[in-house]
């Protein structure tokens, strides 16, 4: 049985002091031993959030990293820096980074490999635009993303990975994919992993749904057999996140 993983993606929100206050506000609301809980936070919030979460069930993730070991890459943050600061997860290939920062699959493949090498667990994002969905190429597109981003990654590492399916048209729009649409693609991603690797790897990898997850739709989404939790943007910044984490209570 795969353990559910519910991660907040804070995006570019929360100053360090606001971040610490939010950790305190959510502390008692996000206790659920049945699921892994992660806050993916802006780089500058990592150190204060790691400290604020000591002794709680919540793990810390980063929202991005660079693939080089170290050196002259002004403004970037390495996997080793994240690891040393107490980070366990890192979002790689969020659609906002693919779109606004022009991150392509070749770059994301390097980031995935470096994160794994450093002992971080990537939360690898994929997802289609509304146009692609309407053209009927959703699964072709996502299979291409997954295959390119995981090029050369070993089965044992993929088994520990988290993949987040986030239809771009559902992010921050209040328009959630229907449960059937979300399950269809998450199941398709699992089939794709079984094809590239094997059945055991596909059964082990955790696949989240993301895109306007909220306290009202989380339980139904997470009840699906191929949806192993969620990547939550807007709703992770408020008390509602507690209801999402405790969806089964
Ligand atoms: P949202 O964002 O929950 O605000 O739609 C999800 C995400 O971008 O990870």
Image (tube, rainbow, N blue to C red):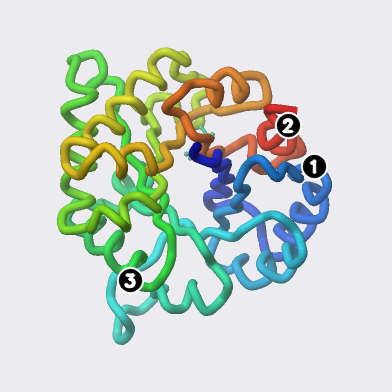
Q: Nearer the viewer, mark 1 or mark 3?
A: 3
**Residue 128 vertical position relative to residue 144 in the rendered view, above or below:** above
Q: Position of residue 62 (x, y in %)?
A: 50, 60
Q: Secondary structure at mark 1?
A: loop
Q: What element does badge 3 sit on?
A: helix
Of the pair 95 and 36, the residue shown nearer to us: 36
Residue assigned mark 2: 243
The residue under label 3 is 117
Describe the element under mark 2 as helix, strand or loop. helix
Q: Is residue 173 left or right of residue 166?
A: right
What is the C-alpha distance between the residues marked 2 and 1?
7 Å
Q: Residue at x 71, y 55 (%)?
A: 57
Q: Percent from the top left, x then y, of residue 209?
A: 46, 31
Residue for badge 1: 29
Q: Residues within 10 Å of mark 2 (few under 14, many from 20)?
A: some
Q: Is residue 117 left or right of residue 162?
A: left
Contact, mark 2 vs mark 1 (Cβ under 8 Å): yes
Q: Are marks 2 and 3 in contact (CB under 8 Å)?
A: no
Question: Which quadrant of the structure image shows residue 157?
Answer: bottom left
Q: Give the foreground label among 2 and 3.
A: 3
Q: Quadrant of residue 70?
A: bottom left
Tell which circle, 2 or 3, labels the residue nearer the N-terminal end.
Answer: 3
Q: How many marks?
A: 3
The quadrant the C terminus occupies is: top right
Who's the residue at 60% across and 52% down the image?
Answer: 39
User: Image point 25% across, 53% down: which residue?
Assistant: 155
Alpha-carbon distance for marks 2 and 3? 34 Å
Residue 196 at what x, y percent from top left? 16, 42
Residue at 43% x, 65% y: name it. 120
């Amino acid at each position: 049985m795969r353990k559910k993983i519910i991660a907040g993606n804070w995006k570019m929100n929360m100053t360090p002091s606001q971040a610490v206050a939010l950790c305190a506000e959510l502390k008692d609301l996000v206790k659920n031993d049945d699921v892994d809980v992660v806050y993916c936070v802006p780089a500058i919030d990592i150190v204060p959030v790691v400290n604020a979460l000591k002794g709680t069930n919540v793990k810390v993730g980063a929202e991005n990293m660079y693939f080089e070991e170290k050196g002259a890459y002004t403004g970037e943050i390495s996997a080793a820096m994240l690891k040393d600061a107490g980070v366990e997860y890192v979002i790689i290939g969020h659609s906002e980074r693919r779109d606004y920062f022009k991150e392509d699959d070749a770059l994301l493949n390097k980031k995935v490999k470096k994160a794994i090498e450093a002992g971080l667990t990537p939360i690898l994002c994929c997802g289609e635009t509304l146009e692609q969905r309407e053209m009927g190429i959703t699964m072709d597109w996502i299979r291409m993303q997954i295959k390119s981003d995981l090029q050369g990654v070993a089965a044992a590492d993929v088994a520990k990975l988290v993949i987040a399916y986030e239809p771009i048209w559902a992010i921050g729009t209040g328009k959630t994919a229907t449960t059937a649409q979300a399950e269809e693609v998450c199941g398709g991603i699992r089939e794709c992993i079984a094809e590239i690797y094997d059945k055991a790897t596909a059964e082990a990898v955790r696949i989240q749904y993301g895109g306007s997850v909220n306290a009202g739709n989380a339980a139904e989404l997470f009840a699906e057999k191929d949806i192993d939790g969620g990547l939550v943007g807007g709703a992770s910044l408020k008390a509602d996140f507690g209801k999402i984490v405790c969806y089964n209570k």
